[in-house]
């Protein structure tokens, strides 16, 4: 069953194929400041509607998209690079291109109270050590 989400103002809508099985908590300088918790999906299974603006920095491998109206980050997409072993470690037995969806924008996701849940079911949080 697909799940929906949006930025704060609703101009950007996201549809993912299922609830996140786990989310990545990245400690890079950007994610630390913005509070991103990322759910990963095959890029051909995620639908994004509405205009976004990509912020590209660091190793310039991904574009981090946000709504130009309210500024809420919604997802990231690769800039054409294959993540090779990094992808396979993050998503075992995978052979797909992936994208990251900011889990906090998904309806039913909650990160209050020291643990993450989706529709009141616990969601595993995995530390992604990307400190700059």
Image (spheres, rainbow, N blue to C red):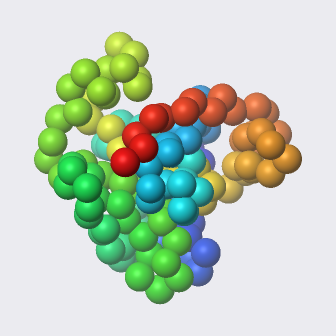
At which x and y percent is residue 67? Answer: 44, 76
Q: In x, y percent, where is residue 105?
A: 60, 59
Please determine whether, in this image, residue 34 is positioned above or below residue 98.
below
Give the total number of marks visible in the rendering.
0
Q: Residue furthest right?
A: 113
Q: In this view of the protein, which residue sits in the foreground, 89 or 17?
A: 89
Report which quarter residue 42 is drawn in. Answer: top left
User: How far across and how far down the image is residue 79, in percent?
Assistant: 18, 52
Please give left or right for residue 57 compared with residue 47 in the image: left
Can residue 11 be seen by looking at this rendering? no
Q: Residue pushed farthest front?
A: 132
- Using the image as rendered, state which of residue 38 and residue 56 is in the foreground: 56
Q: Quadrant of the N terminus?
A: top right
Q: Residue 111, relative to residue 52: is it above or below?
A: above
Residue at 15% over, 42% down:
81
Looking at the image, the residue that sits furthest to the top is 93
Is 38 drawn above or below residue 72 in the view shown? above
In the picture provided, is 122 more to the left or to the right than 36?
A: right
In front of the other: 65 or 85:
85
Tell me the residue at 40%/61% (across/down). Answer: 48
Work out which residue is located at the far bottom of the displayed protein and give it: 69
- Identify the residue at horizontal 39%, vertical 16% (top origin): 92
Camera sees residue 129: yes
Q: Quadrant of residue 53?
A: bottom left
Residue 95, horizontal then vertical, whole percent = 26, 22
Judged left or right of residue 23, residue 111 is right
């Amino acid at each position: 069953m697909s799940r929906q989400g949006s930025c704060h103002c609703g101009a950007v809508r996201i549809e993912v194929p299922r609830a996140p099985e786990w989310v990545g908590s990245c400690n890079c300088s950007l994610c630390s400041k913005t509070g991103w918790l990322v759910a990963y999906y095959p890029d051909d299974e995620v639908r994004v509607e509405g205009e976004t603006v990509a912020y590209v920095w660091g190793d310039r491998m991904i574009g981090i998209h946000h709504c130009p109206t309210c500024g809420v980050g919604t997802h990231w997409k690769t800039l054409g690079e294959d993540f090779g072993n990094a992808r396979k470690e993050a998503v075992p037995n995978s052979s797909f291109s992936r994208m990251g969806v900011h889990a906090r924008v998904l309806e039913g996701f909650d990160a209050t109270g020291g643990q993450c849940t989706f529709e009141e079911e616990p969601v595993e949080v995995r530390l992604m050590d990307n400190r700059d």
